[in-house]
Image (cartoon, helix red, strand yellow):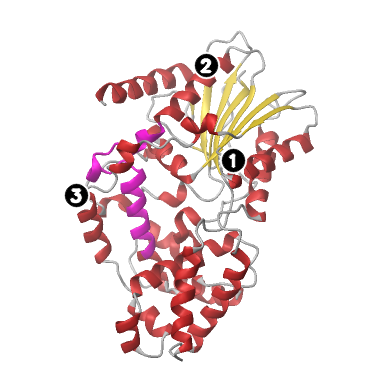
Amino acid sequence: MMARLSIIIIMCLGLMETVSAQTIHDEIIKAPLLSADNYSVYPDRDDHQYTPAPSGKKPFYISHYGRHGSRNMSSLKSYNIPLDMMAKADSLDKLTPLGKDVLRQLRIIHKNVRGRTGDLTALGSIQHRHIARRMMEHYPEVFADSAHIDAHSSTKTRCILSMGSAIQQMVALNPKLKIRMDASKHDMWYLNYQDKLLRDSMMTYTAKQGYQEFTQKREHNERLMESLFKDTAYVRQHVDDGTLNYYLFKVASILPNTHLADSLHLIDIFTCEELYHIWQKENAWWYITYGPSLLNGGGEPYTQRKLLRRIIEEADSCIALPKPGVSLRYGHDTVILPLTCLLNLNGYDFKTMDLEEVESNYWIAYHVFPMAANIQLIFYRESPSDEDVIFKILLNEEEATLPLSSSIAPYYRWSDFRDFYLKKLDAYEASR
């Protein structure tokens, strides 16, 4: 199966020489699995390069929010739909050899996922152990001796296990750590806050129209259907090609997050161009529903205003301590993405009503929220009496930018950050 993936990558790379493409088009051609968006696997690596802190400043506190690690899809329906459609066609002898192979893989996947929908996979646990290890390696001062680790998780099992994997790694490296873990409804008001007013206004009439116009240009299902089914008349009469395409892609894109990734592979039933167009539709959907799209007023990132205020308040409290340690929080992609936009990390607060402008302005969801995505604020000072506290912010362990002026970027002054964002949150809440 991996050989088949190698073939599609080689074909895609050859195509790059003949087309004039956007940067993201090139990225997906080089790495087709990036099209998986929020199902993409975390870029788990140890070669991060960081800017040295200003002279005399040492790390003393870390504030973190992380998405759970790799998981299965959360609904068995997502696996049942393509399996049932393909099995029915097979019973009528309507599948091509490729279609039969796809059905074989779907049956294996379905058998393995029964009773485990939404569960953290082994890879998801590994991702969080590695992130925790790197955190300790890069900032040993924060984790020295009996440092205090305060960890909170969403009540979803995959989030709790992600937290547990990270803590397990930390304790293995330093058994003296003082650990407090909690996962209850008590903290859900900020770990995974659901704002009904904003949620209900995600897909306004204007947003639906804009999204439909954008996606209709990118609906290309004919080639895939012809490769899976013998009879085009059967497809026209009995197959919802858009639905089948969508769910086949979902199963294919979640697969690399599971233990079946080495023995099964479905992503190569799609061409490079098909993957790119599927990704464009997915990216536009995320931009409207959790980003700052003006098609619905641009307010969706404020769903995370309670979390941001909590981060600021906890940081203020911890800065007052001589050795505060680490605040860990574990939750979901639907928090990481709007929080990134609310902070305007790396320019993700880009606002437009034209979905055609989103990609060209580098609003790319898969750069924000792969499995195990995380935001880390690393705080520095010379000593507990040093009031000039600075920090840097990491998105998926990479230094990120904020919309604040700074002569020491990528480091920023905490006082500038808290003043800017508290005013931003206050202004929004006053307008509600």
* Residue that label 2 marks: 316
Tell us which disc is closer to us: 3 or 1.
3
| Residue type (three-letter) at the residue carrying disc 1 | Gln
Which of the 4 image quadrants contains residue 299?
A: top left
* Residue that label 1 marks: 49
The answer to whether residue 342 is left or right of residue 378 is: left
Q: Earlier in the sequence, mark 2 or mark 1?
A: 1
Q: Which residues are magenta?
A: 278-304
**Label disc, if present, on residue 206 of the rendered structure:** 3
Helix, strand or loop for disc 2: helix
Gap in angstroms between the C-alphas marked 3 and 1:
43 Å
Does the magenta-highlighted stretch encompass residue 34?
no
Helix, strand or loop for disc 3: helix
Would you place residue 296 above or below residue 224 in this image?
above
Q: Earlier in the sequence, mark 3 or mark 1?
A: 1
Which of the 4 image quadrants contains residue 325?
A: top right
Question: Between residues 61 and 412, which one lies in front from this camera angle?
Answer: 61
Gap in angstroms between the C-alphas marked 2 and 1:
28 Å
State which quarter of the image contains the C terminus.
Answer: top left
The residue depicted at 33 percent of the width and 53 percent of the height is 285
The residue depicted at 25 percent of the width and 56 percent of the height is 211
Q: Position of residue 367 (x, y in %)?
A: 46, 49
State which quarter of the image contains the N terminus.
Answer: bottom right
Gap in angstroms between the C-alphas marked 2 and 3:
41 Å
The residue depicted at 41 percent of the width and 73 percent of the height is 15
